[in-house]
Amino acid sequence: MAKGKGEGVTIVIRKEEGGEGGHHGGAWKVAYADFVTAMMAFFLLMWLLNATTEEQRRGLADYFNPTNVMGQRPSGSGQPFGGRTPSESGPMASNASSMRVETGPRPVVFDLEEDDSDTPATPVERREGPKGDDETATPARLRTEQAAERRAAEGTGTPGNREAGTGPADVAKAGTEALREELEKREREGLDRLAEQVRAAVRDDPALADLARQLQVEQVPEGLRIQLLDAERQPMFALGGSAPADKAKALLAKVAAVINRVPNAVSITGHTDATPFRPGARSNWDLSAERANATRRLLVEGGVAESRIRSVAGLAEREPLLPNDPGNAANRRVSVLLLRENTRNAAP
């Protein structure tokens, strides 16, 4: 603008610095791109951790940082090109397996005191003691003792011992006999107690007290025998039949309750008198066997295990209780034999 005549024209030039202000700049885009890349890497890492197993993750970690106890740096296996040298044939792949470091047993540490002094050790004075048997024994004496030991081991002993029967075999035999006698003694005492329990069970029952004289309990070489005898007016079974009377059932129930207290095997036999059947009818063999089997059923009903029944037999009139009176009613009986343990074990 001209300010006056004779003065020059003043020109004012205003310059504005070029640039993008506000959100129109591009620097934020670079930062945002870095952030998105980092987030993608993070989510990719999380996905890989979730999609791989522990062994796979360990393998990936070993791949990027392999374990090498011999190398100074965690690169390959301590050598260039992953363990191979350029002079080797084949592809440059690692031919060295990864090494595993495992803890072994703890080393033994000897607690030894170090003597730093230069003082020499003082010798210990040797003391003479009494000589042992090996030092004082002569060769002849050693041979005699060895021969005696061999004879004792073989059970022969010296002539005097052979006559007295005091060798090791005799001692073992004597010990076995003593043990067997002790076991038999205890078994006899146990059967005696059992017999008294059977008698008491019948005697203490008012309904069976009158049958006490028809109950015979005794020990025999085979075991404890319990016999139910017939009487003239008090039969245990129907005459000529195998159906047990009511009192016979009650009596056998008492017997079953007592013998259930021991595990011995049971043998049952039936007996008749010498009265024969009519020709063509059944025999005393049939009758005695049927009564023995009926007794077996009653004992099983009383709780005796079926596996304990060793035998059921009918002997007819071949083993009468009163041989001089074969027609006596007492010969009609059933016998329940509680076998001894050694008899049961010896049976085939």
Image (tube, rainbow, N blue to C red):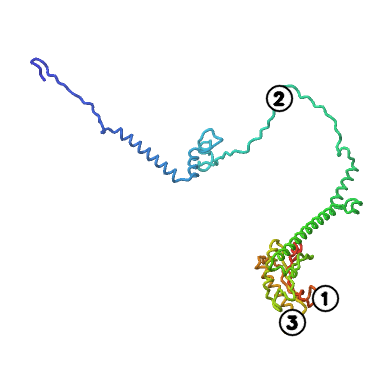
Question: What amino acid is found at the position of numbered circle 2 in the picture?
Answer: Asp
Q: Earlier in the sequence, mark 2 or mark 1?
A: 2
Residue 328 position in % (x across, y down)? 78, 76
Q: Secondary structure at mark 1?
A: loop
Q: Which mark is residue 115?
A: 2
When the figure is inspected, residue 217 is found, relative to residue 327, above or below; the finding is above
In the rendered image, the quadrant that contains the N terminus is top left
Cβ atoms under marks 3 and 1 closer than 8 Å:
no
Q: Earlier in the sequence, mark 3 or mark 1?
A: 3
Picture quadrant of residue 242: bottom right
Q: Nearer the viewer, residue 205 or 113?
A: 205
> Furthest residue to the top?
6
- Mark 3 or mark 2: which is in front? 3
Q: Nearer the viewer, residue 91 or 309?
A: 309
In this picture, residue 101 sits left or right of residue 230: left
What whole-number distance in Å separates the C-alpha atoms at marks 2 and 1?
Answer: 107 Å
Cβ atoms under marks 3 and 2 closer than 8 Å:
no
Q: Which residue is mark 3?
A: 277
Q: Which residue is mark 1?
A: 324
Question: What amino acid is found at the position of numbered circle 1 in the picture?
Answer: Asn
Q: Secondary structure at mark 2?
A: loop
Q: Nearer the viewer, residue 271 or 117?
A: 271
> Furthest residue to the left?
5
Question: What amino acid is found at the position of numbered circle 3 in the picture?
Answer: Phe
Picture quadrant of residue 176: bottom right
Residue 297 position in % (x across, y down)? 67, 70
Picture quadrant of residue 339: bottom right
- Mark 3 or mark 1: which is in front? 1
In the rendered image, the quadrant that contains the C terminus is bottom right
What whole-number distance in Å separates the C-alpha atoms at marks 3 and 2?
Answer: 113 Å
